[in-house]
Image (cartoon, grey):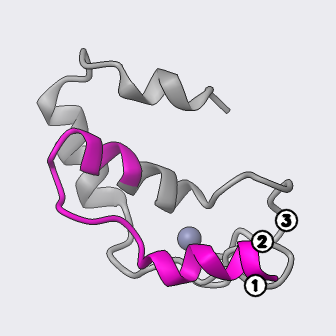
Amino acid sequence: MLPYDAYLDESIPDHVLQLLADLVDPDDCWFDHRGGCQAHGYLDLEPGVLCPHHEAKQLLVEHKVIERECDESAINGIRGG
Ligand SMILES: [Zn+2]
């Protein structure tokens, strides 16, 4: 897993970003009380590690390929729990 700063590298080719946009699930993540993502089947995530789909969406938002990542309320569910 790369540190988050690595995802901000501006040198990612557009076709790679488009490929990622096609691969990523448009459905929002649904985090359970242990921080696993029920929506995408990542049920054994380490504490503080987000679903790869969510990380991919963050990357795509940073590069303005998509307009929004997951619903923030789904993320807030982790912090509240
Ligand atoms: Zn997910």
Question: Residue at 49% of width from left, 22% of height from top?
Answer: 6
Residue 35, numbered label? 2
- Would you say 34 lies left or right of 7 here? right
- Would you say 72 lies left or right of 69 here? right
The C terminus sits in image quarter: bottom right
Q: In front: 73, or 56?
A: 73
Cβ at disc 1 under 8 Å from ligand 1: no
Question: Which callout, 1 or 3, points to the residue nearer the camera?
Answer: 1
Question: Residue at 36% of width from left, 43% of height from top?
Answer: 59
Residue 8: x and y in percent read: 37, 26
Amino acid type of the residue that numbered disc 1 sits on in the rendered structure: Asp
Within-10-Å neighbours for mark 2: few <14, some 14–19, many 20+: many
Q: In front: 19, or 67?
A: 67
Q: Is residue 72 magenta?
A: yes
Ligand 1 in which quarter: bottom right
**Would you say residue 40 is visible in this rendering?**
no
Say whether marks 1 and 2 touch (CB < 8 Å).
yes
Question: Residue at 61% of width from left, 61% of height from top?
Answer: 51
- Would you say 14 lies left or right of 2 here? left
Query: Marks 3 and 2, Cα distance to the nearest angstrom?
Result: 8 Å
SS at badge 2: loop
**Would you say residue 4 is visible in this rendering?**
yes
Amino acid type of the residue that numbered disc 2 sits on in the rendered structure: Gly
Q: In front: 67, or 45?
A: 67
Q: Say which quarter of the image contains residue 21.
A: bottom left
Give the labeled residue for mark 3: 44
Q: Which residue lies furthest to the top in this view?
A: 11
Residue 17: x and y in percent read: 23, 39
Please provide the residue range marked out in magenta: 58-81
Query: Marks 1 and 3, Cα distance to the nearest angstrom?
Result: 11 Å
Give the labeled residue for mark 1: 32
Vertical arrangement, residue 8 with respect to residue 79, above or below: above
